[in-house]
Image (cartoon, rainbow, N blue to C red):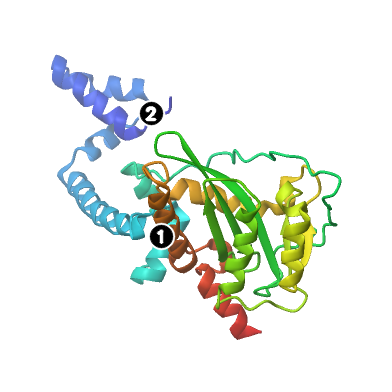
Amino acid sequence: MNVSAEQKFLLIRSVIEKYDLKNMVSFLCETSGVSRSGYYHYFSSKSQEKRNQQETEDLKLKETILKAFHFKRRKKGARQIKMTLEGQFQITYNLKRIRRIMKKYKIVCPIRKANPYQKMLKATQEHTVLPNLLNRDFKQAIPGKVLLTDITYLYYGNGQKAYLSTIKDSSTNEILAYNVSSRMTLDLVTDTLVKLLKNKRVKVAEGAFIHSDQGVHYTSPTFQKHVKKLGLGQSMSRRGNCWDNAPIESFFGHFKDESSIKPCNTLQELKREIRSYMTYYNNFRYQWNLKKMTPVQYRNHLLHVA
């Protein structure tokens, strides 16, 4: 275990005070691998005053960082805190300072867990698997061009389970439509398409297409007819390759870390929490790879520079 000079100084002092070994300072310092002058300097009034000032400053930093950490009641990591401070409070701290304060005061951000979603069924012969048009070209800088969709499980309350279907704009990371259900039936995904159609913020770009895995819902003739009615093309990941739809998997990971799903006792409570998170995510959750903007801000930025 690595022991800091400060810890060594404090240990030496405790031994001296306990056993009244005032003449043993040089010996103990040499044994501990620290200088005698460093020991006396650490306990000097000037040094102690400087540490007290540092502690006062750190406590102020802590309070400011906690404002961003708890902003919109969603816990955040260091990068999210930095961007939230800049975007919401017009305060700029570098990442090194933020991480130091978080470590010092044990401000812990959520740790993403592996996505438990697995394919539940194999496509039957009448279902159609389509080619991969996307080829992982996720960032095309055109809002409404590449739409990613997928389903994830949600466990809440006392062992209850629900399903969340989402459609995400690959260029802006904005969630354009979502649907929640207690059953994993076909209308879970077709209703998501209907909500996409009703979303007045969505302007589909020329040549737009929706990309998914090869799940039974997306190979269904009914789903594929809905896609065509919307005037969209359709693309699918290669079989068993989660990287082909990685951005939406990433969203599900952040969503499960940052939302309060488990405390919900009813499906209605769950839907309210999901609605609240989606509003937060699209409008207030700054993202490092979006030039430190929120998805909505980045969408407007791309439309402005186009």
Q: Which residue is mark 2?
A: 3
Dot label at residue 276: 1
Closer to the eye: label 2 or 1: 1
Q: Is residue 244 left or right of residue 75?
A: right
User: Which residue is painted at 60% across and 54% down in the image?
Assistant: 188
Q: Earlier in the sequence, mark 2 or mark 1?
A: 2
Q: Is residue 39 left or right of residue 245?
A: left
Q: Is residue 123 visible?
A: yes
How far from the left and from the top, in percent, is residue 156? 43, 40
Describe the element under mark 1 as helix, strand or loop.
helix
User: Which residue is painted at 22% across and 35% down in the image?
Assistant: 40
84, 233: nearer the viewer: 233
Mark 1 is on which residue type? Ser
**Count of numbered circles in the view:** 2
- Vertical side of 200 occupied by 24: above or below: above
174, 153: nearer the viewer: 153
- Vertical side of 236 occupied by 37: above or below: above
Q: Is residue 164 left or right of residue 60?
A: right
Q: Is residue 232 visible?
A: no
How far from the left and from the top, in percent, is residue 3? 38, 28
Dot label at residue 13: none
How far from the left and from the top, in percent, is residue 107? 35, 45
190, 146: nearer the viewer: 190
Q: Counting other residues with Cα less than 10 Å from the Cα at mark 1, is it few (<14), some (14-19), or many (20 or more)?
A: few
